[in-house]
Amino acid sequence: MHWSMVSSLFRREFNSYFATPLALIFIVIFLMLSGAFTFYLGHFYERGQADLEPFFAFHPWLYLILVPAISMRLWAEERNSGSIELLMTLPVRNGEAVLAKFLAAWCFTGIALLLTFPMWVSVNYLGDPDNGVILAGYIGSWLLAGSYLAVGGCISACTKSQVIAFIIAVVVCLLFILSGFPMVLDLFSGWAPQFALDSVASLSFWTHFEAIKKGVVDMRDLFFFVGFIAAWLIATATVIEIKKAD
Amino acid sequence: MIEIEHLSKYFGDFRAVNNLSFQVKTGEVLGFLGPNGAGKSTTMKMITGFLSPSDGVIRVCGLDMQESPRLAKQQIGYLPEGAPAYADMTPWQFLHFVAEIRGFSGKEQRERVLHVIDQLQLNEVAHKPIETLSKGFKRRVGLAQAIIHDPKVLILDEPTDGLDPNQKHQVRELIRSMSKDKIVIVSTHILEEVTAVCSRAMIISRGEMLFDGTPEELQQRSKYHQAITLRFTNSPDPQTIVNAIAGVESFEVSSDGRDITLFAKSDVSYQQVREEAEKHQWNIKGVFLEQGRMDDVFRSITEEAA
């Protein structure tokens, strides 16, 4: 792994978000929706509590639509335009390209997330929240976004079509949310052994994010997200190696 | 030096490249010829390290592409078919990016970029997004990124495809000017290009090598090689013309009847034909000694194999 390569590729990728209106549109929609969800659906004022719980509670759903819109282009666009051939004949390793693209997308969603700071300002203005819990919420939310991106990036590497990459990524991410919900677990209970049931449930974004956003920063939850992202990035590099020329 | 040994590539059951072995030395300009789908691009993609071969070894300047891909790729400049680039970048940004990946920084990076922009006359479009450029400019941007690090090996997949005649001429001049201390491999289906720039021609069809030699040797394979064509101002009866010249074995008449091409044993000379023409006072515009027609050789070689 040559970090200078990763850094060059990262900067190209990151700047490419701002070369088109994509960045602006994404950030504006993200801020509008996260605000609307928090205030209307989350009853931010009516709850009378000085915390950002209703704000973070909608992130798994918000990301479900918005993050695949970022991840769909990561590789599908390279394949479709043929620039993948250029990229892969430069003295760059697969792993470096995969990591750089992921980090650029992740930092981009990080910026969108940071721009929600007025929410934090207002809750501090209105009351006296536990800022440690809020920080944990932000970290958890960013890790969640990274997990969606890692899944979406891998799916994008499988296809030339950004639309297909988007739809499949939404479905797969949905499964990873729902795997902690009874409606999915009920499919397994009754016939599958308990450890299988537990492992399905433990793969859910929902359960891990739920804990972090309440301010309970358990290392196991952090490891889950970091490990999850790493596993999908390795899978992406493998897919690229096998399918790059198709 | 590029060394290719027993190179094969399968896509499922389809054999795209079959047991190719050859070497290319510094200073050579090798032209890959072949019908569409012959395996030219697949071979180039393997030499540049984009595709892994199913079988065989590729060494670029002594470096094994499978074992040390990063070092091997550093020796190569590659223009993929269709000259793909990052469409939302400008040539200025794109060339800086490639120069950076190629390991140049600071002042040297800027100088490299300015040099190739100048060399390929990209000044007027340097700050326009690549997606808005014409095909000719896109191709030149692709060439610029391929030569920015002054590579020892230059691999160009259809470098002049879609260019106008002036641009084609420029690209060929560029290839010629750079070929002295490099290995250049170009693929093309424009046969004139082979005689114009290549020192060596290779015909590939269905993944197999059918010909490997100089462009002159290729021309000599043509039945038109050393044939004599008479161009008339009228359309005379070919048989009387042919009967007047001794030693003609067969002949061909062009569709307008004004050109008669004579195929003969070696003892019919250009001089002899000229003399006969003057003696009989034929209405002649010119007499040509044919060098051989590339398209005819190309067809016969590739169709024979089919």
Image (cartoon, coloured by chain):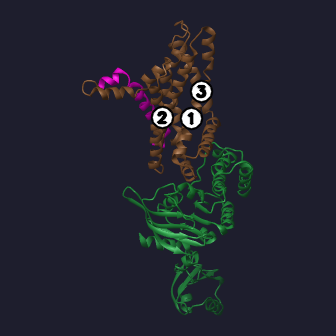
Residue at point 55%, 65% (across, down): B62
Q: Which chain is brown?
A: A
Q: Which chain is green?
A: B
Q: Amino acid at mark 1?
A: Ala
Residue at point 65%, 90% (across, down): B281
Provide the secondary structure element on which disc 2 rests: helix
Q: Which mark is residue A105?
A: 1
The answer for which chain carries disc 1 is: A
Provide the secondary structure element on which disc 1 rests: helix
Main SS of residues in magenta: helix
Q: Is residue B41 above or below residue A240?
A: below
The region drawn magenta spans A158-187
Q: Which residue was labeled with disc 3?
A: A112
Q: Is residue B244 above or below residue B1?
A: below
Instruction: State which tag comes first along the sequence, 1 or 2.
Output: 1
Residues at marks 2 and 3, CA–CA distance in whole angstroms:
19 Å
Q: Is residue A188 above or below residue A4?
A: above
Q: Position of residue A161 (x, y in %)?
A: 48, 41
Provide the secondary structure element on which disc 3 rests: helix
Q: Amino acid at mark 2?
A: Ile
Specify whether disc 3 shares its chain with disc 1: yes
Q: Amino acid at mark 3?
A: Ala
Instruction: State which tag comes first along the sequence, 3 or 1.
Output: 1
The answer for which chain carries disc 3 is: A
Q: Which residue was labeled with disc 2?
A: A229
Instruction: State which tag comes first along the sequence, 2 or 3.
Output: 3
The answer for which chain carries disc 2 is: A
